[in-house]
Image: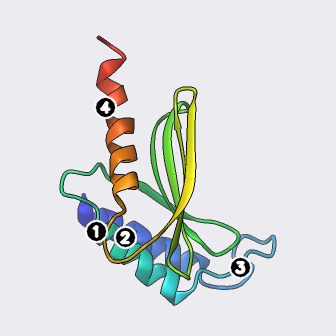
Amino acid sequence: QEIAMFEELLRTFEECREPNWDGYGAEPVRQETYRLAQQFLDALPLGTPVPSLGAEPDGHITVEWYRSPQRTLSVSISPEGELHYAALLGVERICGTERFRAKMPQVLVNLVKRIEEQKTESFG
């Protein structure tokens, strides 16, 4: 599963490394952004569910944990090493920016946990 995650990252990078990769003038995903995303995925705590990956028109790489429209966390990785995140937990919206320094910020670890927890709670 982990290998597939890094393959998906590489595929995203290769598909989006040229300017205008979406046909609408998108910024290319830079080598630094790809490297930071690799480090970010490497820094995920053991047992963290595998996220889905993508790229944005501004050249950022997106890492997303999606459980339902009300249970989602999206982290956008910039080439400068900023993690812009937005989470939706029911009616609660949480967003912010963290610097990435080789380890996963605790706020994001907690948000992933909360998104995963909700899944089992809703049946109780």
**Residue 27, image quadrant:** bottom right
User: Which amino acid type is marked by label 1?
Assistant: Ala
Which kind of residue does numbered mark 4 sit on?
Glu
In the image, residue 23 sits, relative to residue 50, either above or below, namely below
> Residue shown at 64%/75% (left/top)?
59
Quadrant position of residue 56: bottom right
Mark 3 and mark 4 lie on one chain; the one further toward the N terminus is: 3
Q: Which residue is mark 3?
A: 27
Which mark sits nearer the N-terminus, 3 or 1? Answer: 3
Q: Amino acid at mark 3?
A: Glu
> Which one is in front, 93 or 38?
93
- Disc 2: which residue: 40
Q: Is the Cβ of the residue at disc 4 closer than 8 Å to that at disc 2?
A: no
Residue 21 image point, x, y percent:
69, 76
Count of all numbered marks drawn on residues in the image:
4
Residue contact between numbered discs 2 and 1, judged by CB atoms under 8 Å:
yes
Which residue position holds label 4?
A: 117
